[in-house]
Amino acid sequence: MPKVQGYSFDTQHFIECGDEALEALREWRHTDRVNWIRIQGRPGVLWMRRYGEVLGLHPLAQEDILEGEQRPKMEPYDDHLFVVLNVPVLVHGRVVLRQLYISLHRNHLVTVFEGDRDPFDGIVRRLRQNGHDRLRRADLDYLFYALVDVAVDGAFPVLEQLDDQLEVLEENLIVNPDRRALGDIYRLRHDILLLRRSAWPQRETLGRLLREADEWIGETVRFYLRDCLDHAHQIADLLQTLADTSANLLDIYLSSASMRTNEIMRVLTVFATIFMPLTFIVGVYGMNFRHMPELEWRYGYPAVLGICLMIALGLLIWFRRKGWL
Amino acid sequence: MPKVQGYSFDTQHFIECGDEALEALREWRHTDRVNWIRIQGRPGVLWMRRYGEVLGLHPLAQEDILEGEQRPKMEPYDDHLFVVLNVPVLVHGRVVLRQLYISLHRNHLVTVFEGDRDPFDGIVRRLRQNGHDRLRRADLDYLFYALVDVAVDGAFPVLEQLDDQLEVLEENLIVNPDRRALGDIYRLRHDILLLRRSAWPQRETLGRLLREADEWIGETVRFYLRDCLDHAHQIADLLQTLADTSANLLDIYLSSASMRTNEIMRVLTVFATIFMPLTFIVGVYGMNFRHMPELEWRYGYPAVLGICLMIALGLLIWFRRKGWL
Amino acid sequence: MPKVQGYSFDTQHFIECGDEALEALREWRHTDRVNWIRIQGRPGVLWMRRYGEVLGLHPLAQEDILEGEQRPKMEPYDDHLFVVLNVPVLVHGRVVLRQLYISLHRNHLVTVFEGDRDPFDGIVRRLRQNGHDRLRRADLDYLFYALVDVAVDGAFPVLEQLDDQLEVLEENLIVNPDRRALGDIYRLRHDILLLRRSAWPQRETLGRLLREADEWIGETVRFYLRDCLDHAHQIADLLQTLADTSANLLDIYLSSASMRTNEIMRVLTVFATIFMPLTFIVGVYGMNFRHMPELEWRYGYPAVLGICLMIALGLLIWFRRKGWL
Amino acid sequence: MPKVQGYSFDTQHFIECGDEALEALREWRHTDRVNWIRIQGRPGVLWMRRYGEVLGLHPLAQEDILEGEQRPKMEPYDDHLFVVLNVPVLVHGRVVLRQLYISLHRNHLVTVFEGDRDPFDGIVRRLRQNGHDRLRRADLDYLFYALVDVAVDGAFPVLEQLDDQLEVLEENLIVNPDRRALGDIYRLRHDILLLRRSAWPQRETLGRLLREADEWIGETVRFYLRDCLDHAHQIADLLQTLADTSANLLDIYLSSASMRTNEIMRVLTVFATIFMPLTFIVGVYGMNFRHMPELEWRYGYPAVLGICLMIALGLLIWFRRKGWL
Amino acid sequence: MPKVQGYSFDTQHFIECGDEALEALREWRHTDRVNWIRIQGRPGVLWMRRYGEVLGLHPLAQEDILEGEQRPKMEPYDDHLFVVLNVPVLVHGRVVLRQLYISLHRNHLVTVFEGDRDPFDGIVRRLRQNGHDRLRRADLDYLFYALVDVAVDGAFPVLEQLDDQLEVLEENLIVNPDRRALGDIYRLRHDILLLRRSAWPQRETLGRLLREADEWIGETVRFYLRDCLDHAHQIADLLQTLADTSANLLDIYLSSASMRTNEIMRVLTVFATIFMPLTFIVGVYGMNFRHMPELEWRYGYPAVLGICLMIALGLLIWFRRKGWL
Ligand SMILES: [Mg+2]
Ligand SMILES: [Mg+2]
Ligand SMILES: [Mg+2]
Ligand SMILES: [Mg+2]
Ligand SMILES: [Mg+2]
Ligand SMILES: [Mg+2]
Ligand SMILES: [Mg+2]
Ligand SMILES: [Mg+2]
Ligand SMILES: [Mg+2]
Ligand SMILES: [Mg+2]
Ligand SMILES: [Mg+2]
Ligand SMILES: [Mg+2]
Ligand SMILES: [Mg+2]
Ligand SMILES: [Mg+2]
Ligand SMILES: [Mg+2]
Ligand SMILES: [Mg+2]
Ligand SMILES: [Mg+2]
Ligand SMILES: [Mg+2]
Ligand SMILES: [Mg+2]
Ligand SMILES: [Mg+2]
Ligand SMILES: [Mg+2]
Ligand SMILES: [Mg+2]
Ligand SMILES: [Mg+2]
Ligand SMILES: [Mg+2]
Ligand SMILES: [Mg+2]
Ligand SMILES: [Mg+2]
Ligand SMILES: [Mg+2]
Ligand SMILES: [Mg+2]
Ligand SMILES: [Mg+2]
Ligand SMILES: [Mg+2]
Ligand SMILES: [Mg+2]
């Protein structure tokens, strides 16, 4: 069962209650106050069948909430505006997209957050403290803006964490590419692409709110929503930069590995090409033929050592000329 | 010969029949009931020549059905709206796109499904059971929506299977890249790209139905079609994510293989560069020259072993400094 | 000199002639019949200077035909509509794009095909056989459609061949990547990209014919041109799929090669790291030092063999633990 | 100092002069003749300060000419139309983009070409020869078209050269990839991308001339400019094909190199894995232990040779089964 | 605390002051002079709370300045036009994007530059020197243009530096790819992509200024802003070219490394395959079997050397045929 909280306020009053808000709403709705039903946790089918109508949600909006995993969108219905936003959170270092549903009605507003804790504690605190806060003085559409603003800006700390992780990878990448790092890049890149995919419709949703929701959102609040759209642009830009950087990283990683193979091969080749001829030569004079005149020579042994030295030096010079040393 | 079923219903009546529906349609058409001719299996040329006109299909629509392999599209003709959708199904683990043709006329609706079993059994069950089901109470356009909805949502289970397969590959990829996995990635990626290619015109078709088909689809049903379009967006998004993930996987796979080559080379190089000089040295003292004073030395043998040990240690230290050990 | 054929027909009459058609056209033009001048082979400058005006071609249209290698386009002039299409043909297994020029005038139509044989033999056969064929009954714009239809659909058999070739490559790719296959992929991919590049303006040309040529093409024929556009979409989709598949193939190819290198290296490394220490050891006891006490031992020889065996086994166990065996 | 030439003509007259044209223009401007000031070489600041106003160039147009390195664009000013085009030329086999500025005024036209020799010698020859040439009979806008046409078509020979170079690389690529070829591909690809980058705004400039310059260009000349736009499309298409082909080439190149490494490794591995065990075995019987009973055997030597042969054959059979031979 | 300077001028007067400008502005605002408040360094929250209103900045504009890291944008408010531009600067060879905020009010203009030194010293010098300079004679919107122009053109020197760095990398890339170069490419490419990401919204901002800011910018100044937009296009083009070139470089780099590995492998393989059989043969005749008849032969030794020579020559010929030498 989801957790329900209800707030009904104007500059003079501030009423706050729990589950009973769903009943109180029938009455609040006819006052001049701003009314907000805040739901945390995903509702089940039975819950929705019971309260969906009281909240004023169209059957298709109810279905979306029950299904979950919606992409960001804005859908005007006859008597309410239904908005879906994605709020990225980090769970054990991996990105998870949480759904936020905001339904803006003529005289009340419903938020449903898919996870345990929506990001609106700060707003409630502002509402409670002070009758002169802009939120207490303003209309329903300003509350709507404030909620959207918090939801959109929730992406920034997540992006910063991803950026930090990328930078750590970046640092020890060229120096020492190993296989564990590969898995890290893969996971990071997966999360970045996932976020980027959701940032585009989020941006579009905000753009449409600005252009098409004038039935629901007043002129003055629209300046504020433009700021949200601007932040959505910033987020999409940042994600594109992170995606580029991670692709870049992968390319560099690959190059760095093949560069190391190269160096290793060079060492192997230098050693092998020097010692193989020498080993052959000493092998020759290790043969047991009866008739091998060199074996009897007085300076045969130092001569062979000298030849070996000369071959080794010759090959070293050749390698140096090739730039392998 | 395709399998034909006919349904003619309103809240009071529910008539269901087989092949004879094609004849009955001439009469049904003039009643106030909702009439649906449901065809499963691809019709042949003779069949179409015989029944195409009764069904009210334009020659070009008939041709499309006979040809098969159409891309999703919506084509208004003078007296009917012709819609082609693609329904992905899994056959032996590979994706196959089945064609669904829906032709919406003034007073009847025709569906043709290319495969053995269209996905509409659930809808027929709802129709049969209950005179108060929304489908029995509503108009032809709501039946049209219900069919499109089922067809579009048919992609979700297929996508989930592909996603699961990707995840399995993902897990044992970095640990142990082998050549069979390559073939799996290739096949999976092929299917994902195929689906993605068909998801785009499907989405466009639904968008055009929403914008351009107001002659055929009423205002209230349009809210419901918007939900189908939303699902088509979700499907296209999911496919893009799968495509990105599979590209990502391939890059990682390649990197992982070259990383392993690297490690293998390092082992080989360390062994070879240590033992080649040593083998040379012992080869030297295996030569049979008469005059090799070292051979007579009391401690010649342990001296050589000592030199070998020192060379080996020296090289090991050098490799450790290079970070190869 | 290009081959010229002329056709002038209605339901009652069917006149067919050769080069003299160019003269006859002056008169045909003033009848109510449908008149078609069909030219196969690229005209030269002199030919064009002589007949260009009779045919009614604007100087810029003449220039395009003389130049050849035009991209698909539609250009309305004051008194005729000039259309360029690309017809892909296979010559010795490689794709070649042949130009087709169709010029639709008030009362006649000119086709110029760049190659030896245009794809219109089937249409002429239909014209000759039967006064009741739709082509004989209909107007100039329907003939125009029929020609465009044949030209557009000419791409399908070519695409199928390319697809078959891709599939053959695909099959023995992962199993056995060799260098000849690389050349095949390269050539195939080159042809696919070439075709794709021409499919886009072709599609655009048909779209513009549908939207902008209502001065030349009647309402009923426009349904039929929409079918051509649909086929052009299908062709562009297929080409994109082929392009994706071939890119995919190349990536797999590359990965497969590096995977094989990997396996080969593993075998080499296992052999080398086992035998190099052993060869060193037996080299030690092949030295000719006078004072090597082990040589005198009773069980020196089997001890050395035993040590060799133990080293080999130890390394094999180590490799198995590393997963290299 | 740039080289200045002036032409003032109609069907009857043809006046041609040098630097003095800048003065004559003040008077020519008030005649009914077509007046063209042709400047070759980039003007300096002083020159421009002195003559810019006589030529009728807006300060911003003057600045563009002085700066150089402009991208193709079309800019209408109050009293003239200023057009910048890029003309690619080959200098020592590398592509260089030369700027061409065309300024179309009410009654005169100015061309400034950044390099030593603009591509307009052919046009001047046509003007000189014949009072009945279309250029002599037509208006200022037709001269404008003729100049643009020559400038746009100047790209074709450059593209053909690049295509030829690509084909040469293509031929010996798969057979024998070496490092010099890499540098060639890099340079070629750099030039192709540079050209492609400039072809896009060039095409856009011509499109805008067609759509937005009706104040300056008459209806009949617009058919001709459409031909220029068509060529600009062809050029952009060709460049895209060249870019694709060169990317393709690079991928193949890389694959080919890794394929060769593969083959080389195979040879090495086959040799090494056969000879290393054999060398070990003969090393064993080269040891000097006193007690090695095999050494005394009558058929010890041929037995060892036989064992060596069997090991070699066994490994060869194994390699053949693995497909490495 | 940011550094504040104020300028108030017309052709007759030129007033310049420091922090006191913030107070003077209240009065200046009501004169006919052009008034510019120039702020260098990022303001803090307290500073903004104190002076934000005097400067006439909307709370959201104030917030943007306080936050920093804005993307380029243009936002009209009721009584001022707020523009954000990015000015790239090089700090220790790496690109850093500095924010420039320009706020254009009815009768004054505010610039805030995030860094220590904005790029406007040259403009102030022109203002001080000469009452007849265009800047002194013109209106507020021309000053606005002049500031935007300087800010946009600030990217050119940075781009040139990046281009030079790319060229240096390019030169020693094919010859000698090493691992340090990889890090350089990575860093360079990171900076180029970062700049490119900011160049797109910058260009869009200038385009919107041209199209949508006619309430703030007069017709004549709009010609000049078109020139800024043109430069923004040039910058975006250059960045795309740099991005392409750096991607190209990376591909070449990778290819070059694998080509070198190839060459190294070839040398190793040639040496190893020649010397391994030879070493085996001489090992055979180093065995100590009692019964080895060849050892007793008169010409056994030279025969073995001859066989070795023939094997070596045979292999060399084989390698040459394979093209490995
Ligand atoms: Mg839904
Ligand atoms: Mg879902
Ligand atoms: Mg915000
Ligand atoms: Mg904010
Ligand atoms: Mg970073
Ligand atoms: Mg890449
Ligand atoms: Mg069709
Ligand atoms: Mg088909
Ligand atoms: Mg659905
Ligand atoms: Mg549903
Ligand atoms: Mg996943
Ligand atoms: Mg890739
Ligand atoms: Mg042309
Ligand atoms: Mg041409
Ligand atoms: Mg067709
Ligand atoms: Mg057809
Ligand atoms: Mg296939
Ligand atoms: Mg790729
Ligand atoms: Mg300029
Ligand atoms: Mg410049
Ligand atoms: Mg031309
Ligand atoms: Mg021409
Ligand atoms: Mg070619
Ligand atoms: Mg080619
Ligand atoms: Mg690439
Ligand atoms: Mg690539
Ligand atoms: Mg902001
Ligand atoms: Mg920020
Ligand atoms: Mg500028
Ligand atoms: Mg300037
Ligand atoms: Mg350069």
Image: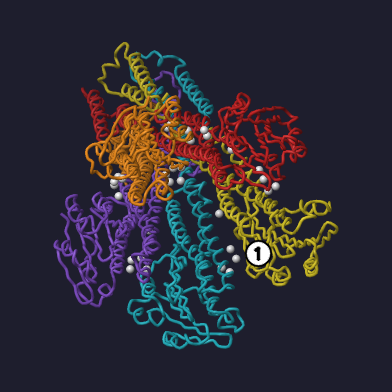
Chain colours: A cyan, B purple, C orange, D red, E yellow
Please tell me in which quadrant of the rendered image residue C192 appears.
Answer: top left
* Callout 1: chain: E
Q: Is residue E324 left or right of residue A306?
A: left
* The C terminus of chain E - image quarter: top left
Q: Is residue C280 visible?
A: no
- x then y, percent, for residue D53: 75, 41
* The N terminus of chain E - image quarter: bottom right
Three-letter residue code for mark 1 = Ile
- Count of numbered circles in the view: 1
Q: Is residue E1 left or right of residue D186?
A: right
Please tell me in which quadrant of the rendered image residue B104 appears.
Answer: bottom left
Q: Is residue E109 left or right of residue B277?
A: right
Q: Nearer the viewer, residue C26 or A13?
A: C26
Q: Nearer the viewer, residue E44 or E127?
A: E127
The answer to whether C265 is drawn above or below residue E221 in the figure is: above
Seen at 28% across and 16% down, the residue is E294
Element on which disc 1 rests: helix
Q: Nearer the viewer, residue E241 or C5?
A: C5
Q: Is residue D112 left or right of residue A9?
A: right
- x then y, percent, for residue B252: 41, 49
The answer to whether C153 is drawn above or below residue B115 in the figure is: above
- x then y, percent, for residue D226: 51, 40
- Would you name the residue on which mark 1 appears? E65
- x then y, percent, for residue A144: 52, 75
Please tell me in which quadrant of the rendered image residue E101 appears.
Answer: bottom right
The answer to whether B27 is drawn above or below residue B255 in the figure is: below
Seen at 25% across and 49% down, the residue is B67
